[in-house]
């Protein structure tokens, strides 16, 4: 029987709240360390932090311990998605190893719903959001961190205020607005509100503020324009933060459920999270298929995360080590 | 920093400011207006003056909810400021398999609420993992009601929040650790400082601005806690609804066809005022540190 | 002053200035003229149908029904939208706010009520005077609302709750699955046996009482005009006291305190409890979830008056094609199409003509078939127990207060008084 189901997917607080403030400032004063682009030496990459085998063992032990604590839901979902039709899913004690492992559930998901179409739609939305956030937040963050202009303090204050501003009760009016712009039932309408997130503007501002001022000043002496300074001095030093933004934006766009559901009408345009709900239909929910669908939706996140996390340290490893 | 044309900064910040105005400030203004009405999602709003605010005063659930939110913040703030930093240090070094661990530690952030509820139920309910261990070790004769007792439910939700937040803040810390100049570590190591001393004298000062940022994020998000309590209590907020958070109340009043948008807006604004406190405190702290 | 505020609110709410439409487009139309257009107009052109969570399992069925409709009325075009189960109320709400409800839309009665109050739905009895002759009274009544004149939806499929017992757990603990409890007192007595025999490992009772249990204890839930709640009576308190004592005795798992409607099913699936209530299709879905448990389940009728669950098809007043919309709603809900639907899964038609179909009253020897027969027999005396006025927020409040009373932290009377007071407040807005 269908009953009104409470929705937790789009709930506030589920998404991480946006960021903060003036935290940035201090980082800039550290100065100097990024100036040299000398190739890294063997001492630089290893040097002081060569660990003894015992230390490495302890590190792995700790890593495994944390792994054990965090990985439960993922494992359960993975194992459910591999369980055969004759196996119980909701048992008293969770069974993590499928007795009759099968990949059939994945095939069935693809048979049941147009999973590729949905995934493509999700990719489009995520791509628009990522582009918007990387460009919009980089420009905005740079202006706030590096340029002096009238009203800058007020603008910054407003950005900070968004961290605590209430907006929980206005999702219907946001829909009416997007509809008014002619974007109802379009992927653009889905992507629009999240295309520039205030948290990311603040994160980028923090990152730019950490770039040593001396670099900018030197470039200024050389007659570099704002754009040149942003491109040649700012950007190379904030790649770590950009990758954080890419991750946050991708996951936000990929996982969002309620907003795409409200904006979209045509099932051909559904994003993956919405489309996967079809596996949870009236009289027909199969937890194995739902788990398989969730794993499919999970994979791109893992890939994006795996690729992006490499950049966390790039700035340091390439630029910061003096020969 | 100088620039030739006055409008250059506005050009750069322009898009962000437009989004700020349309998708953040406008809903907030909207909320203020709604809070003086008895509006419903399908219209019918009428000006009712301060009625909604008066109702805040004799809402018994609200007092509990505020208390819950504040307890939540006080416990989460230290835990989530420190633990993810330690975790970030643990996964910072590029050792074989580290990508796997980093990714795995991030998975709770993106796990679906339904599955999280299921797993945590297995861990915490009457015959769950924890109660099984307690019984076997003889620490408890009868099951501890982690999910139905007013305070235990709250602390279970805090544990869940910390569990979920580890990976999220770990990522922010990771990118901040990248900004701690390696040569400072090296210099310190040459001076004979051990790992612990290097942590206190090099790492900690290096990530201090980020710590302030992260604590601000945590205080805001823990005051606005919703999904963790919702999931563990099946949306019921415990017996008598004593484990509701303010956002759960806002949701309860605003969702659905009969949503009481006016009252929900007043609750929203109250929460806004409450959140300002720790934010201002942390900003001050930050200025002092600078 | 007041007018300025009203104007501001409307702007804020619907951003009407930007959209130029939104709410109100329905209000300008006269219901009677739409109804007569529906009754007399020609069935052709475009019409949209919105169902709730029927894809993909029933895709072929619905498509077949639509094809049949197109065959009967050449020149008509049907656009079918199926919305996912999750978030449906938000979806319908934003459609209603923007004035974009499809021409025929699946609304359970508790969704239809607020929309009909805003005068957004067509009174289908006006467009279709024979309605009451063709559909069972319970179904039609579900779409009549206190204080509103008319019927605001065609009743579609029906369901009710049946008692399900785990024969394995009963037998193991010295109880006879052939003689399951038939009343609360018997339930408590058998639960005691279960507790003693299993050493507190399994339970028989699996849920805290709800409005349905109060109703069956003779408590009047709401005043007839639907403007006030009345379930804080001594009988209601006595019932809660009974449950409180049983809870204290350890006859119920602690989880019941925070569980919702389907919570007992979850406990049953996990083998923690030996009893649950669910719809007629439960064993079928259990066969998917926990296949080893499904064959060990037996069913029996609900304790007193079973609850009636109704789904229906409503038509928004601002539909651009009233004639085709009414024809389509009638077509989807006609006896033939509903019977075909009911053959696919354990739901029941709301058409009178289907009542004598032997398919429903004869089992097929399986326990799922037995449950279907039990449900079908129960349906005859099933009633809409939960008033449609009870929305999510009220359900939450009622659940919270009943849990408080069962846990013993407040007296039953106190808890019921609080629940009634808060629900009344929510009701008034």
Image: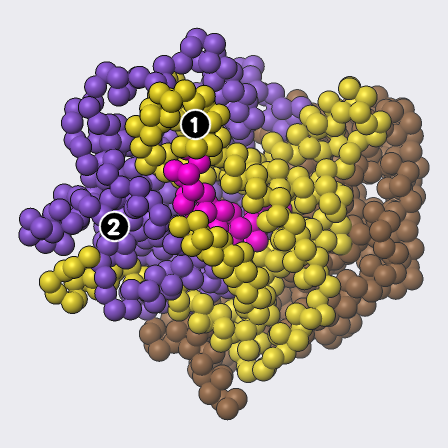
The residue located at (91%, 45%) in the rendering is: C245
Which chain wears yellow? B
Position above or below: B98 against B254: above
Real-space CA distance between mark 2 and mark 1, rounded to the nearest whole angstrom: 33 Å
The reply to whether residue B32 is in sight is: yes
A214 sits left or right of A8 in the view: left
The quarter of the rendered structure image containing the C terminus of chain C is bottom right
x and y percentages locating residue A198 in the rendered image:
36, 55
Q: In which quarter of the image is residue C114?
A: bottom right
Marks 2 and 1 belong to one chain: no
Chain label for disc 2 = A
Colour chosen for chain A: purple
Q: Is mark 2 on a helix, strand or loop?
A: helix
Which chain wears brown? C
Q: What element carries label 1?
A: helix
C65 sits left or right of C422 in the view: left
Residue B198's label in the rendered image is: 1
Q: Residues within 10 Å of mark 2 (few under 14, many from 20)?
A: many
Position above or below: C253 against C20: above
The residue lying furthest to the left in this view is A223
Position above or below: B251 against A257: below
Chain label for disc 1 = B
| Magenta stretch in the rendered image | B203-229
x and y percentages locating residue B86 in the rendered image:
49, 30
Q: Nearer the viewer, residue A128 or C109?
A: A128
Q: Nearer the viewer, residue A124 or A21?
A: A21
Which residue was labeled with disc 2? Answer: A138
Dominant secondary-structure state across the stretch colored magenta: helix
Q: Which of C136 and B168 is in front in this view?
A: B168
Position above or below: C363 against A41: below
| Residue B208 inside the magenta-drawn segment | yes
A234 sits left or right of A193 in the view: left
């Amino acid at each position: 029987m269908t009953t009104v189901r409470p929705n937790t997917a789009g709930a506030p607080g589920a998404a991480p709240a946006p960021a903060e403030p003036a935290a940035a400032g201090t980082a800039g004063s550290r100065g100097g360390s990024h100036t040299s682009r000398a190739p890294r030496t063997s001492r630089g990459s290893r040097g002081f932090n060569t660990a003894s085998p015992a230390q490495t063992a302890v590190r792995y032990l700790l890593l495994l311990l944390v792994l054990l604590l965090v990985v439960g839901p993922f494992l359960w979902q993975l194992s459910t998605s591999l369980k055969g039709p004759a196996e119980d899913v909701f048992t008293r004690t969770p069974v993590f190893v499928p007795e009759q492992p099968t990949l059939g559930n994945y095939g069935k998901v693809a048979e049941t719903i147009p999973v590729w179409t949905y995934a493509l739609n999700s990719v489009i939305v995520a791509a628009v959001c990522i582009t918007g956030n990387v460009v919009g937040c980089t420009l905005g963050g740079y202006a706030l961190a590096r340029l002096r202009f009238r009203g800058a303090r007020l603008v910054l204050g407003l950005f900070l205020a968004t961290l605590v501003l209430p907006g929980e009760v206005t999702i219907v009016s946001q829909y009416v607005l997007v509809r008014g712009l002619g974007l109802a039932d379009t992927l653009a309408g889905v992507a629009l509100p999240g295309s520039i997130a205030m948290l990311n503007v603040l994160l980028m501002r923090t990152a730019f503020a950490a770039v040593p001022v001396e670099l900018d000043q030197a470039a200024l002496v050389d007659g570099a324009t704002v754009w040149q300074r942003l491109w040649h001095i700012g950007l190379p030093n904030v790649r770590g933060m950009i990758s954080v933004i890419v991750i946050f934006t991708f996951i936000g766009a990929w996982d969002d459920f309620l907003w795409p559901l409200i904006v979209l009408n045509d099932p051909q345009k559904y994003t993956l999270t919405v489309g996967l709900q079809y596996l949870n239909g009236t009289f027909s929910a199969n937890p194995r298929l739902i788990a398989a669908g969730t794993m499919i939706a999970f994979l791109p996140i893992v890939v994006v995360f795996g690729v992006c996390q490499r950049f966390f340290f790039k700035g340091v490893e390439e630029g910061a080590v003096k020969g | 920093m100088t620039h030739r044309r006055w409008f250059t900064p506005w050009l750069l910040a322009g898009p962000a400011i437009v989004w700020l105005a349309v998708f953040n400030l406008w809903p907030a203004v909207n909320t203020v207006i709604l809070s003086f009405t008895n509006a419903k999602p399908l219209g019918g709003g009428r000006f009712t003056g301060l009625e909604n605010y008066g109702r805040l005063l004799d809402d018994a659930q609200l007092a509990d909810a505020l208390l819950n939110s504040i307890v939540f913040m006080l416990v989460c703030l230290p835990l989530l400021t420190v633990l993810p930093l330690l975790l970030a240090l643990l996964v910072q070094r590029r050792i074989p398999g580290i990508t796997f661990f980093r990714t795995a530690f991030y998975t709770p952030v993106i796990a679906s609420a339904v599955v999280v509820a299921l797993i945590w139920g297995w861990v915490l309910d009457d015959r769950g993992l924890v109660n099984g261990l307690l019984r076997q070790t003889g620490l408890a004769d009868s099951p501890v009601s982690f999910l139905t007792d007013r305070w235990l439910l709250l602390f279970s939700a805090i544990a869940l929040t910390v569990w979920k937040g580890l990976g999220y803040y770990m990522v922010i810390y990771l990118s901040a650790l990248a900004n701690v100049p390696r040569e400072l570590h090296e210099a310190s190591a040459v001076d004979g400082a051990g790992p612990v001393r290097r942590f206190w004298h090099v790492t900690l000062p290096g990530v201090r601005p980020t710590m302030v940022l992260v604590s601000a994020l945590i205080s805001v998000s823990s005051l606005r806690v919703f999904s963790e309590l919702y999931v563990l209590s099946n949306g019921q907020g415990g017996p008598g609804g004593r484990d509701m958070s303010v956002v759960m109340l806002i949701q309860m009043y605003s969702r659905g066809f009969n949503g009481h948008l006016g009252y929900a807006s007043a609750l929203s604004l109250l929460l806004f005022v409450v959140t300002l406190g720790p934010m201002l405190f942390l900003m001050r702290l930050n200025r002092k540190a600078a | 002053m007041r007018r300025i505020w009203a104007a501001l609110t409307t702007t804020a709410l619907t951003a009407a200035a930007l959209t130029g439409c939104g709410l109100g487009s329905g209000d300008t139309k006269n219901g009677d003229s739409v109804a007569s257009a529906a009754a007399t107009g020609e069935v052709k052109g475009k019409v949209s149908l919105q169902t709730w969570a029927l894809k993909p399992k029933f895709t072929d069925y619905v498509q077949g029904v639509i094809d049949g409709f197109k065959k009967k009325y050449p020149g008509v075009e049907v656009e079918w939208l199926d919305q996912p189960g999750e978030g449906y109320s938000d979806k319908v709400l934003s459609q209603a706010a923007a004035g974009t409800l499809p021409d025929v839309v699946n609304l359970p009665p508790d969704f239809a009520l607020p929309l009909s109050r805003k005068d957004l739905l067509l009174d289908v009895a006006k467009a279709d005077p024979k309605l009451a002759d063709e559909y069972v009274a319970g179904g039609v009544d579900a779409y009549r609302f206190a204080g509103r004149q008319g019927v605001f939806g065609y009743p579609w499929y029906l369901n009710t709750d049946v008692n399900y017992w785990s024969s394995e757990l009963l037998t193991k603990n010295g109880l006879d699955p052939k003689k399951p409890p038939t009343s609360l007192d018997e339930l408590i007595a058998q639960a005691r046996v279960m507790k003693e025999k299993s050493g507190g490992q399994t339970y028989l009772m699996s849920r805290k009482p709800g409005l349905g249990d109060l109703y069956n204890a003779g408590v009047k839930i709401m005043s007839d005009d639907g403007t006030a709640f009345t379930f804080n009576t001594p009988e209601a308190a006595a019932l809660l006291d009974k449950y409180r004592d049983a809870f204290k005795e350890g006859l119920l798992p602690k989880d019941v305190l925070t569980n919702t409607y389907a919570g007992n099913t979850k406990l049953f699936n996990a083998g923690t409890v030996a009893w649950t209530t669910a719809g007629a299709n439960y064993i079928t879905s259990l066969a998917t979830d926990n296949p080893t448990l499904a064959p060990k389940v037996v069913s029996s009728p609900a304790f007193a008056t079973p609850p009636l669950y109704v789904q229906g098809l409503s038509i928004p007043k601002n539909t651009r094609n009233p004639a085709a919309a009414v024809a389509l709603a009638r077509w989807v809900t006609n006896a033939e199409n509903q019977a075909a639907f009911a053959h696919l899964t354990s739901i029941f038609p709301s058409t009178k003509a289907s009542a004598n179909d032997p398919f429903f009253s004869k089992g097929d020897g399986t326990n799922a078939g037995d449950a279907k027969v039990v449900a079908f027999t129960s349906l005859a005396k099933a009633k809409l127990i939960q008033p449609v006025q009870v929305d999510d927020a009220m359900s939450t409040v009622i659940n919270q207060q009943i849990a408080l009373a069962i846990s013993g932290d407040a007296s039953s009377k106190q808890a019921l008084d609080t629940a009634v007071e808060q629900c009344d407040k929510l009701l008034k807005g």
